[in-house]
Image: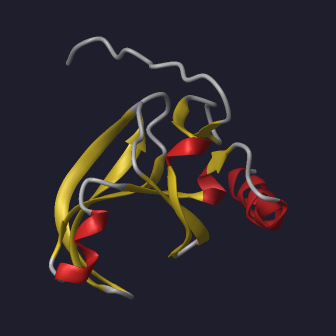
Amino acid sequence: MGRVFIIDLDGKVYSCIHCKTNLTKDQDIMSKSFRSKYGQAYLFSEVVNVSTGNKEDRMMITGLYTVTDIFCVGCGLNVGWKYVTAHDVSQKYKEGKSVLELCKIVGPHDSNDLVCQQVSQLMIQ
C-alpha cells in the first residue's frame, strides 16, 4: 500500500467528524433531500480523501442500485456511499455521485441540520 496523500480544500468545506479530513465543498451539493439509516444525508457531485469498499446491490427507497461504501482516508470512518449503477433509468443522474451522512461529517450545515450534528456527537462519545 502506498502513501496516502490528503487533498486540502478551500472555501466552505465538509470534513470527517472524527479526524477533520476534508471531504467535499459546499458548492458540490446536488441535493439535501437524502436519507440514511442514521438520518439526513446530502448528495455530492464530488468527494475527495475517501477510499471505497466492495460493490454491492442495495434496494433503496427509489429502487435498486449498485453502490460502494466510502471511507475517510484519514481515520477509516464509513462516511456514506457512492452510486456505481442505478438500475432505473430515471435515477441514472446519481451514478458516480456520493452521499455523505450528516451525522458523520462537520461543515456549513443549515441550521435545520444541527440536530444531526448533535446526535453524531453522542454517537462518538
The quadrant in which residue 118 appears is: bottom right
The residue drawn where x is 31% and y is 65% is 94
- Callout count: 0
The quadrant in which residue 113 appears is: bottom right
The quadrant in which residue 57 appears is: bottom left
Residue at the top extreme? Answer: 3
**Dividing the image into 4 quarters, which one contains the N terminus?**
top left
Q: Which of 91 and 19 is in front in this view?
A: 91
Residue 27 point in image, percent of width and height: 56, 43
Residue 38 versus residue 124 in the image, above or below:
below
Taking 8 as reference, is 18 left or right? right
The residue drawn where x is 17% and y is 59% is 55
Residue 116 point in image, percent of width and height: 74, 64
Residue 9 point in image, percent of width and height: 55, 23
Residue 124 versus residue 57 in the image, above or below:
above
Taking 93 as reference, is 6 left or right? right
Q: Which of 29 and 69 is in front in this view?
A: 29
Residue 102 versus residue 61 in the image, above or below:
above
